[in-house]
Each structure stands twice: as structure tokens, then as C-alpha cells.
Amino acid sequence: MINILMSGCNGRMGQVISSSVKERDDVTITCGVDIFDGLKNDYIVYPDFSNIAEPVDVIIDFSNPSALNGLLEYALKNEIPCVLCATGYSDEQIAAVNKAAEKIAVFRSGNMSLGINLLIEISKMAAKVFGSDFDIEIVEKHHNKKIDAPSGTALMIADEISGVMDIEPEYVYDRHSVRKKRDKKEIGISSVRGGTIVGEHDVIFAGDNEVITISHQAQSRSLFAIGAINAAVFLADKAAGNYNMSDLLKSRY
């Protein structure tokens, strides 16, 4: 049985993960950390990481970047692996995460869906095959309460595709202000906000007389919870280092 500390346990995703853990027999949540204490949980919830007494094998963090310093201090002191699901880290925080990975196992991904990360691997393969003969466009859709655009997942997809291209691409987020022919080095990224869309991402490869679209639709937040829990199980016995969803996918095929 793997003992999980759920950081951000009273947030939306923290509660989804807590519910998903109850359906499994290989993991349990022994405690949580959240500055908000207005919810009742089946485990004790601390306001910070300073007085945790319960056994912890791995941390899942779905909180806010502001919690990172306390989390890393606790994890390093107790040599506990971390699954970091929050987005919006500063360059300094990313540097702190990379430094921590020299001593503990750290799993970080901008999207915890196995399906999205499989989409990324397929898109990278397509980009290698098509080269500069195909134009690449990424379209992401989310609910009308999402504040940031484009989504962190869309940027993650673009970054991963860029890493396998022969040229250094330019991200183009808005075409209405510039009237010119599309450049071959562009990756277009478009955002849609409406209704209660959980999350949809399309990667479009448009060539001469043919179009290939690779799509993923998130129909429930539970899929992100499942991915985070699977990442925790994967990470629990790993040596120090940086890990991501590609490593988890490779362990499955």
C-alpha cells in the first residue's frame, strides 16, 4: 500500500483524487495539506507542511505554485518523491524543482491525462514524418471560467512538437492583426472558451490535398485524477531524477 500526502486536497482536483483513491486498493491518502479548511475529509488536513506526523511515501500536489517552497523543503528533508501537477511555476521555481530532483524523484507534467500524453507522442512522430511539408495548428477548447489562454496543455503540445522539428518554430496566437501569408515555421495556437467544456485539444497537420487531425476530449476531471495516482504509484520506488508522462507511458509499452 502506497501512502499519499495530498497537497491541495480541498481544491477541485484534490477532492476528485480523494474520491478516486477510495476506489483503489493499492494506494491510500494518509493526510492532506491545504490552507482552506472548510471541507471534511477522511484524513487529517494540515495548513502547511511543518507538523506532518503521518507516514508518507509520495506527495501529489494539485495546489498553487505558492505552496512549492514548503512542499520541496518537506520532501527533501524526508526524502519523499513528488508528483507536481500545478502549472504556472516561475523560472526560479522550475530551477528549484530541478535542483530538488538531484536528491529525490520528481514527476512533473502540465497535463496528467494519459490520453493527452499519448496524443503528444503521436504528434511528435507525425511531425518527424511530415517535416516542413505540413502546416501545424493546435486548437484548444475549455469552459468559460478558464482564465488563461492558450492552455498550458496546448503550449506543452507545441513545445514537445518543436523539440523534434528541424527548424525552430514560431508560435502564432492571433492572425487578425497581421495580413500576410502563413510562414512554414509557424505553429498556430488557437483558443476557444465556452460552456462547460472540460478540455479538448486538436493537433492539425495540413498538407497538400490532405489533413490529419489528432484529437483528445476530456469528458471528466477524473481522468486527470487517475493519471496523477498512476504517476504516484510509478514514482514511489524511483531513484532521484526528473520524470514525466513520457516515462510513465514507456513503462507501459
Image: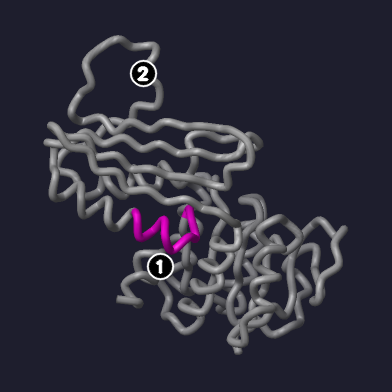
Q: Which corner quadrant holds the C terminus?
A: bottom left
Which residue is rendered at x = 50% and y = 38% of the image?
141
* Residue 75 versus residue 123 in the image, above or below: below
In primary-sequence order, the first of circles 1 and 2 is 2
How far from the left and from the top, in percent, is residue 209?
A: 14, 32
Q: Nearer the viewer, residue 193 or 146?
A: 193
Taking the view exactly as shown, the residue that stands out farthest to the front is 209
The residue under the point 59% across, 56% down is 220
Name the foreground residue: 216 vs 169. 216
Label 1 with label 2: CB-CB less than 8 Å: no
Seen in the picture, residue 75 relative to 196 is either above or below; the reply is below
| Gap in angstroms between the C-alphas marked 1 and 2 | 36 Å
As drawn, the label of residue 148 is: none
Give the percent coordinates (x, y) of residue 115: 42, 60
Which region shows up in magenta?
110-119
Identify the residue at the far bottom of this view.
1
Q: Amino acid at mark 1?
A: Tyr
Q: Position of residue 35 (x, y in %)?
A: 79, 57
User: Residue placed at 48% from the left, 68% from the top?
Assistant: 106
Quadrant in which residue 43 is drawn: bottom right
* Residue bearing mark 1: 243
Left-right relation of 114 to 73? left
In the displayed structure, would residue 48 be above or below residue 189? below
| Residue 72 x, y percent position in the rendering | 59, 65
Report if residue 194 lies within the magenta region: no
**Tag on residue 175?**
2
Within 10 Å of disc 2 (Cα), the crowding (few <14, some 14-19, many 20+) is few
Q: Under tag 2, what secondary structure?
A: loop
Helix, strand or loop for the magenta stretch, by majority: helix
Which colour scheme appears in the figure? one colour
What type is the residue that disc 2 sits on? Answer: Arg
